[in-house]
Amino acid sequence: SFNTFAVTMPNGIYLWNVQACDSVGLCAFDSTNRTLTVDSTNPFINITSPAGNNTYVSRTYIASTVNASDAHLDTINLTISNSTGLWNWTTGTANFTVNWTGLANGRYFINATVNDTVGNTNTSSTTWITLDTTLPFVNITSPANNSYYVVTYFTARANASDANLGTINLTLW
């Protein structure tokens, strides 16, 4: 005879067996106890480096660290992409750091996913970092070099350009 049992249980590890009894009161268990693991919790995942979004640095590498935890941790995938698409990915089974080198200027997006052996998954927040090793272009348009003024003030004009232009300062010595 075939019977189905449905039981709702919280997360945990359970040892179980089935007992059957006949009409005269003879009872028996299966010859082997079984172990059942209930895990409905998604694994934890976090990119700890680079920290935060909106980071601008002058270098050609990105070091990224990912941390994950779960009682049944299986695989961690760390990906880096830019405007042209997926650039690289790394897979691990424990917390790790990847140093991507030889990168061109531009914005890079870093994301991590994790799964456990039960099938639960989780995805980190996407963090981004902009690499910029190009100096800004600056051109003073006025006053002309070696100019003379009879007043105690002057107006300066300059053009500046850069893919990630921040502030423009006038410095007098």
Image: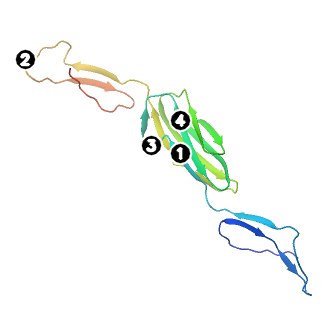
Image quadrant containing the N terminus: bottom right
Q: x and y percent of residue 2 in the render?
A: 85, 74
Look at 53% across and 35% down and name the residue there.
Answer: 63
Left or right position of 90 against 37: left
**Residue at the spot of label 2:** 150
Q: Verify CB contact (< 8 Å) between mark 1 and mark 2.
A: no
Q: Nearer the viewer, residue 51 or 140?
A: 51
Residue 149: quadrant of the picture = top left
Which label's residue is closer to the chain start, 4 or 2?
A: 4
Q: CA distance from mark 3 to mark 4?
A: 14 Å
Q: Earlier in the sequence, mark 1 or mark 4?
A: 1
Q: Quadrant of residue 171?
A: top left
Q: Which residue is mark 1?
A: 47
Q: Do tag 3 and tag 4 residues touch (Cβ < 8 Å)?
A: no
Q: Nearer the viewer, mark 3 or mark 4?
A: 4
* Residue positioned 80% across, 66% down in the render: 34
Query: Which mark is on residue 63?
Result: 4
For the C terminus, the image quarter is top left
Mark earlier in primary sequence (1, 2): 1
Q: Residue at x 31, y 25 (%)?
A: 160
Q: Crowding at label 4, few (<14), some or many (≥20) Cα neighbours within 10 Å?
A: few
> Measured from the top left, where is residue 7 in percent x and y?
71, 74
Residue 53 marker: 3
Q: Note whether 91 is above or below 136 in the view shown.
A: below
- Discs 1/3, front: 1
x, y percent for residue 126 = 51, 45
**In 3D space, how far apart are the residues under numbered discs 1 and 2 (Cα atoms)?**
60 Å
